[in-house]
Image (tube, rainbow, N blue to C red):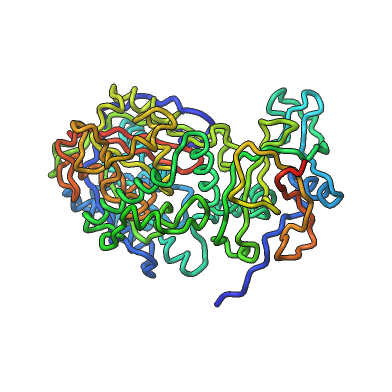
Amino acid sequence: MAFVAEPGPAELESIRGKVAIVGVGESEHSAASGRKLDDMLFAAIDAALADAGLTPADVDGLMVSGQSAGQMTAARFRAHYGLGGDIWESGAGGAFSFAATAPHAAHEAIASGKASVIVNVHGTDWASQNAADAGGPATAHLAEAIKANAEVPFGFIPQPVYFAHVARRHFELYGTSADHLGAIAVMSRRHANGHPGAVMRNKTLTMEDYLAREPFIDPLRIEDCCLISDGACAYVMTAADRARDFPKEPVIVEGVGYAGAIEGIHFAMEPEFASTPHRMSAPGAFAMAGLSPADVDVLAVYDPFTIVALMAIEDLGFCPKGEAGSFVECDRLAFDRGRAKGGLPFNTHGGMLSHSYLLGINHVVELVRQLRGEAANQVADAEIAVYGGFSGVDAGTLVMRRG
Amino acid sequence: MSEPRPFPLPDLQHASTAPLWKAAARGEFALPRCRDCWAFDWYPKGHCRKCHGSNIDWTTLSGRATLFSWAVVKRALHKPLAPIAPYVSAIVEIDDDRLTRFVTRLIDCEPAELRIGMPVEVRFADLGYPAVETGIMAPLFAPSTQ
């Protein structure tokens, strides 16, 4: 199964219970730092291998985001650690939606004997690139011909402008308001304030602070937009039947879903404009896992903007479409208001809004720690976790269980 | 300090979009449309989404549309757009086919009075109106005066 963004949901063979995540690691996360991407990638890999009780020589598979620049290669991995031998290599991993679907592609490699211990890794130096005015998230959008010739000249660039239109539409269709977006921003910050690795660990944000800010791309405020960070994360996958051989309690992959947006990178043309492809990706993942949203103890969603997180909550099935605004009121998303109390602990590390802009792979790292019981903002009795990955053109859903 | 970058201009020769800009230079708003079933081909795929034919032609339209969504860009994050900020970015549904959207910029409007579903109409002006003179006429939109 190649994960390419064909419109609509992908048909995925079940891998329920086949793959385990046995190690997670990350570099330091920061604003523009001048750190080299390679150094951050190796820091994350070193940490993930140490967490799994492995050495680099144990690794025979490497997954990265094939479309992202500067990611790890098998050749650099071997050279860095002074290793010979073959390493299975795949561009179907990394972050975004692929932090959710990497276990599916990993299973194919494991089942066919191509690899047995696979590291999925992603890093970004977009904070340093942005500071140098040399790239960043808009690069691919500026390069696309239709956008360059029929959107950018009108000022429809970059992503905060797109999602301000989406938020406006969601407001008008469903009665969503700034308070609802603010609830996402404020809870994300509260979680980051309790997380020692979060970029925004020392900066508080109250609802009063949020509402006092003037929108800069109305209706979005700066606090509705994710951070731009430098950092890297990695996780280690292996066959679930080997998972007990590793030092930490394993996390078992129960379900994976994937779907492409109907109009791809042309967000303005998407038929369901105030929605995300999560609505097409999630049903398959929950069906594979034999679970429903009501079974989920902790949720992490790819949150480039508060409005995307809000839509993800409804599109993943946690509330009816259009009702996420009222759903997120009254601290329902707090880590300490668990499922038993009618809550939905959400982005317990602070997400991309307040932890780090690691494009969702940091969300998977956080969920693994939640299921092991070693998270900073620990959700009581967390057994089932869901990651909703997104990239604008697609969505990937990952359902995990404490092993 | 980096050099100020020029206002983002379309490639007037790019096959997929050149007729849009050529029409605007004539004071016309045109989009590609299937000659067999009248479905619009915007953004251009080069074949008809509805009947899958390839008999696509650019058609001059009424220029009337309905506001689908908008954003008031007070600070342009894409630096070449800074001279026109604040501006109102918009997506409109063209009245000739409400399933077809067009990305544009709203001018001569009061942001507080904008509403989804309100009628708007094409207003040809320099792409950089009112702050930058690019020499390229563009199909901008404004609230309908009728």
Q: Can residue A82 be seen?
A: no
Residue positioned most to the bottom? B1
Residue A332 pos. (x, y %): 27, 39
Q: Which quadrant is home to the C terminus of chain A? A: top left
Residue A301 pos. (x, y %): 35, 41
Residue at (36, 68) in percent of width and height? A35
Q: Can residue A299 be seen?
A: yes
**Relative to A391, residue B125 above or below:** below
**Relative to A7, residue B125 above or below:** below
A332 or B114: nearer the eye? B114
A37 or A220: nearer the eye? A220
Please give left or right for residue A275 compared with residue B27 in the image.
Answer: left
Please give left or right for residue A43 compared with residue A94 in the image.
Answer: left
**Relative to A313, residue B23 above or below:** below
Residue A278 pos. (x, y %): 43, 33
Residue at (32, 40) in percent of width and height? A329
Residue B115 pos. (x, y %): 60, 41
Residue at (33, 63) in percent of width and height? A30
Which of the 4 image quarters holds residue A279? Answer: top left
Q: Which quadrant is home to the N terminus of chain A? A: top left
Q: How many marks?
A: 0
Residue positioned most to the right? B26
A286 or A71: nearer the eye? A286
Please give left or right for residue A158 compared with residue A329 in the image.
Answer: right
